């Protein structure tokens, strides 16, 4: 294994959702960040993403086991792994929803992060401590019409976080999640609608007590906190990151 005084962190699926803020927050915290995304096999995508940051290195493998193998081959030890998992979530009503989309949601949002942890676990046990952080969702707090596939997958991974935390706790490995909603990303809350139109802005103001979308840097703060925490006692936590959503507006008097 590589011998180094540098601290390494792995961020999966780094180009979307909580990936960019996770990468930046961990760089700011002093990590060398191994950024994974299958899209990084295209050098133009990587060059645009890394933007000359010397402490950022790429992993472009597709299979979770290959991602983990490449990360440990480079780093030797990984005190922090951020599993940032996302998949498009258009509304699909049950009478016409293609079952293959249910499988795709499960694979991307549940199976992929589980396989990352499963592959990493022998290394993490040998280390004696690590922080495994997942970026999930709290969308299941208020299910939406047409959201059965995404809701099922997000509920599954949040439940899995709690169970995995129990199994990993004896080895000094924490398993925690940040569960956002109303986080700005082009995948889920594109600026063309939610920032640049009155209809989109009004929807956000009516839905979120904070009255706006979260800036990506804000979730980066939470991810960095969990990734750098020294306490082993905080594990199995799922931190809602949704500006107070869901809430019931006050009744008119």
Image (spheres, rainbow, N blue to C red):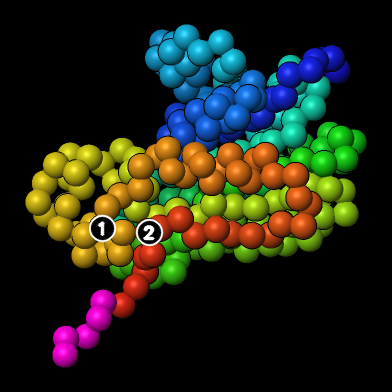
Density class for disc 1 (Cα within 10 Å; few <14, some 14-19, many ≥20) is some
* Element at label 2: loop
Q: Can residue 150 be seen in this view?
A: no
Image height of 20 relative to 46, above or below: below
How far apart in space, not on screen, are marks 2 and 1 (Cα)? 8 Å
Residue 60, magenta (yes or no):
no
In percent of the image, x 36 and y 42: which residue is there? 215
Residue 144: x and y in percent read: 33, 67
Residue 249: x and y in percent read: 26, 77
Image height of 112 relative to 14, above or below: below
Q: Earlier in the sequence, mark 2 or mark 1?
A: 1
In the picture, residue 31 is in which quadrant?
Answer: top right
Q: Is residue 21 left or right of residue 73?
A: left
Identify the image quadrant of the C terminus. Answer: bottom left
In percent of the image, x 50 and y 28: which residue is there? 24
Bounds of the magenta segment: 249-253
The residue identified by callout 2 is 243
Question: Who is closer to the viewer here, 44 or 49?
Answer: 49
Single out the residue that lies furthest toward the left: 198
Question: Who is closer to the viewer here, 195 or 187?
Answer: 195
Q: Can residue 31 be seen in this view?
A: yes
Identify the image quadrant of the N terminus. Answer: top right
* Element at label 1: loop
Residue 231: x and y in percent read: 76, 50
> Could you tell me if the residues under marks 2 and 1 are in contact, i.e. CB atoms within 8 Å?
yes
Magenta segment, principal secondary structure?
loop
The residue identified by callout 1 is 211
In the picture, residue 233 is in which quadrant?
Answer: bottom right
The mark total stands at 2
In the picture, residue 29 is in which quadrant?
Answer: top right
Q: In this view, does 134 lie to the left or right of 76?
A: left
């Amino acid at each position: 294994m590589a011998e180094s005084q540098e601290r390494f962190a792995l961020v999966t699926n780094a180009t979307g959702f909580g990936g960019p803020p996770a990468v930046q927050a961990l760089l700011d915290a002093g990590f060398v960040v191994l950024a994974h995304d299958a899209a990084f096999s295209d050098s133009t995508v990587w060059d645009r993403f890394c933007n000359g940051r010397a402490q950022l290195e790429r992993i472009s493998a597709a299979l979770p086991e290959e991602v983990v193998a490449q990360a440990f081959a480079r780093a030797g030890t990984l005190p922090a792994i951020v599993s940032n998992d996302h998949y498009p979530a258009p509304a699909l009503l049950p009478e016409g929803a293609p079952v293959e989309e249910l499988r795709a949601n499960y694979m991307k949002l549940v199976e992929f992060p589980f396989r990352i942890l499963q592959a990493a676990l022998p290394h993490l046990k040998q280390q004696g401590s690590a922080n495994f952080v997942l970026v999930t969702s709290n969308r299941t707090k208020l299910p939406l019409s047409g959201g059965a596939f995404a809701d099922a997958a997000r509920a599954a991974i949040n439940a899995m976080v709690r169970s995995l935390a129990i199994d990993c706790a004896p080895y000094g490995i924490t398993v925690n999640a940040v569960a956002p909603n109303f986080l700005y990303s082009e995948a889920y809350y594109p600026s063309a609608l939610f920032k640049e139109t009155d209809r989109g802005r009004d929807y956000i103001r009516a839905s979120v007590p904070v009255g706006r979308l979260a800036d990506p840097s804000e979730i980066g703060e939470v991810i960095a906190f969990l990734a750098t925490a020294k306490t082993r006692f905080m594990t199995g936590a799922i931190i809602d990151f949704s500006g107070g959503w869901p809430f019931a507006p006050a009744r008119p008097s």
